[in-house]
Structures are given as C-alpha cells and as structure tokens.
Image (cartoon, rainbow, N blue to C red):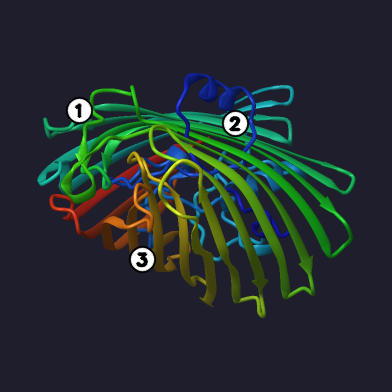
Amino acid sequence: MYLDGRSRLRLGAASNRLCRWLAVLFPATLVGSVSGQSYLAPAPGFQGAPAVPSMGNVTPASGANNGQFSSQTLNQIDQQANGTPESNGQATPTTEGGKEATATAPLAAPFDAMASWGAVHVHPHASYQFLYATGIHNQPGSEADSFTHTVSPGVSVVLGPHVSMDYTPSFRFYSEKDFHDTVDHSFDFHAGYNVGDWMLGLSQTFAITDQPMVETSSQVKQQTYQTGLLASYNMSDKATLATTASMRIESTSGAGTTNIFVGGTNGAAAQLTDSQDYDVAENFDYKFNEKLSGGLSASFGYTDQAGGFRSLNESFSLHVGWRPTSKLSAVVSGGFEQQSFLDSKSSSAWNPVYSATIGYQMFEHTALSLFANRSSQASIFSGQLSQNTSLGVNLQQRLLEKMQLSLGFGYNQVDFQSTSTADLSTSRSDESTSFTAGLVVPFLTRCSFSAFYQYTQNSSSEKGFSYDSSQVGATLSWSY
C-alpha cells in the first residue's frame, strides 16, 4: 500500500495535565518526532535513533515533519497489519509503496525472543554511546566542550503478530559541570490489523527529554505525547481512501529549572511555553501502474499555544510516487497551508509545504539519496511560529559485505515569526549546515559497533545563538 501518501498530519503540543493524560490514555495520532533541534547526537534506540546519526540531517535527534507519518511508523503498522512483526523492534525505512529503502543498516537481529509466554515475545536491547562534543551552548553566548556517556537499556514486547511496544530510558552523563546529568524516556506503541478491505492502525508515543537545544542555547526539559488513529479502505486494486486523526501535546512549563528565559524579539525575553495540536485528514491514493502512483491529501486542525495564539489550520497537497526502474525511486509531495489566527493581530498566513525524497541505487552496494522538506509549526517560544526548510544528500556504501559507510551533508533554515505583528515579521533566523560520516560494523550476530563524526555550523540573526560544533563518538549496541 502507498502509505506515504496517506499522511498529512500536523503535530502540536499541550498545556494542561488533563490533556496530557488524555494523550496517553486515548491514542489518536500516528506519529511524530520531538520538536526542537538538539545539539547532541541521539542515543541509539531512543526515539528510533540509528546507531549512527541520520545522514544529511542538520538536527539528527528530532525535527518537525509537517504532519507526515514517518516511514518507520508506517512500516511498523503495515507489518503488524499483515501479521509480520519485526525482528528487533526497529522498523526498516520504506519508500512509496511500502518498498524497502535502498540504504538500510545491516543491524537486524533474528526474530528469536529471549522470553515468550504464548503470543507474548520479549526482546531486550541495550546500547552504550561515547561522545565528545565541542561548542555546545549552556546559555546564549556561552559554550563548552563535554564528554558524554549514554547508557540506553530497553525492551520491546510483541503481543501476537499485530501489536508491539518499546520502552527505552537513556542515562546521559556529562563531564562539563555546566550541564546536568539526565534520564530521558521513550515509549512507543504500534498496532495494525487488516479486516477485509480495511486496515486499522493505532499509535502512541511518549518522550521526556532534557538536553541542550539549538533554539534556546541551553538545556531544556520537554515532555511530548503523540497519539493517532488510522482507518484505510481499499476501494479497488488501485484506489485507497484513508482517514487519520491526530493529537500532539508538548509541555515545557513546570518541567524543571533548566527552562530559562531566552532571547526573543529584538533581544527581549521570550519564555518557553506549552502547546497542543489536533488534526484530522483525508487522503486519496491511486496506483496508475507498477511504476507510478499519486493522490490528494487534505487536513484540518486546531492549534493552541498557551499564552501565545490559537489558530485554525488547513492544508491541501498533491503527492506522487514514481519508480521507473529498480534502481531509481522518488516520492514528492507539495501543496499549501493556511493558518487563520483567532486571537492575535496577525492576518491569515499562507505557506507552501513540501517534502521530497529521491533514491538511486548506483551499484549493488552503493545508494545515493536526496531529500527536501518545508514545514510550519508552533514554536516553543510564546507567541511565535517556526518555519523550517531542510535539504540534504546522503551516500551509503556497503564494505566487505558487512560494514556500512555513510556520508551525509545537510542544510537547514529556521525562521521564528512573531504572531503579535500583522505581517508575521521574522524575529530570528537560523541557518545551519552539517556534515556527517559514520561506519557501522555488525558482529556476533546480535551486536554492532559504530563510529561517527559530525560537524555543524549555525549562523543566527540573534546574538549569542550562532555556534560551530564538532562531535565524534562511538556506539556499542546489542539486541535480542
């Protein structure tokens, strides 16, 4: 099924405890990623992070996805709906049409469970990451170098062929006294089931993070809850209609003393805030032939930023999946989004939104991919929106039949726009470029070792937020 085209979800974040519990107890969204840009490479296994930071991404830990389902989540739901659970709790990235991406790490472990009770199968996993990072900000205009050690034990549980869940805490220890040690938490639940021509999907994610962020130039604690529901109907062998509902809740207030005031409009103070986003979407997909598919997507949502703004959101887009040969594939989506503000001076905002991924299998063990994305969402700063544009290229090469080399380059621009002005004037603009190189070496069937280097340069229009950072690290992972 052409699942990429079905997704046009918008994600937001929430302001009160009741809504946060509703997000946990009543799943209503299918995915998302933690908002905000982290300085540090994510721990493997946390929030679906790979052993090596995502190639070509300026901010490997997280980022807005403009309401689109992640390929990882869609692959999980599709596999569970068809009764083929994954080998180690980690999904294989997919392209349009559910095909495997051309560049995947050779890290899948056998499906043997360490413990089984009937339909319940338990798969533990663990990783250790060593990282040395330079130029990390502990407050605007002040940077430090730090060694970090991250231990991430976790467990995946498969409940029959259609349901899986994973919980992974990450314990990170800093050598630099200006940063405090943290314990992050990540929980993922996915379920999928086929009933005749229907496919039903359910997803729930929850994360607590406390890490240095590019937006704030300081360590920030966040709580993010995302819930979602999918109902897809095969109208014929070629046509599919899908309905999705989503809710995203993000909290920074009251999460700890690390959330300080940071630079805002014209250098004024800007407080971090909570926000919430609700969305429903309708998606139509049509398979013209084995090489070409396409469709339409429309979504309607509501965003409420605590102490900031409230808005009604509409998004309309076209998407195309093209696979002319076994070596070349492309998935492109483009359209526009209208945001009507209910309680601010700003007039309605019209923004282009798009995403594109092109993959080319140059040789049997060599893959090249390009990506581009533009999205808009509520900022973690009160009364502000963030416009995100990213471009990147990634090269992956298999070496000696087992090792995998990855090289990536990415460009990212983030504009913070104030909703207190009629024209949504830009209060701050950041431009980042990054280069990443990594090598993954599997060994002893269930283990892998990886080493990586990442260099990032960020230029900001706001004083104290520009930085240059080099990161070098190694990860040892095990999964059963």
Q: Which residue is mark 1?
A: 180
Q: Which residue is mark 3?
A: 408
**Please, is residue 212 above or below residue 423 in the view?**
above
Q: Secondary structure at mark 3?
A: strand
| Residue nearer the viewer, 44 or 357 | 357
| Residue nearer the viewer, 118 or 292 | 292
> Residue at the location (13% across, 50% down)?
464
Give the residue type at disc 3: Gly
Q: Is residue 411 left or right of residue 119?
A: left
**Please, is residue 307 above or below residue 116 in the view?**
below
Q: Secondary structure at mark 2?
A: strand
Which badge, 3 or 2, comes first in the chain's sequence?
2
**Closer to viewer: mark 3 or mark 1:** 1
Q: Which residue is mark 2?
A: 165
Give the residue type at disc 2: Met
Which badge, 3 or 1, comes first in the chain's sequence?
1
**Please, is residue 38 above or below residue 468 in the view?**
above
Image quadrant assignment for residue 139 = top left
> Residue at the location (79% across, 73% down)?
288
Q: Is residue 291 visible?
A: yes
Give the residue type at disc 1: His
Q: Is residue 418 left or right of residue 5?
A: left
| Rendering coords of residue 173 (x, y %) | 23, 30
Q: CA distance from mark 3 to mark 2?
A: 31 Å
**Total number of numbered discs in the rendering:** 3
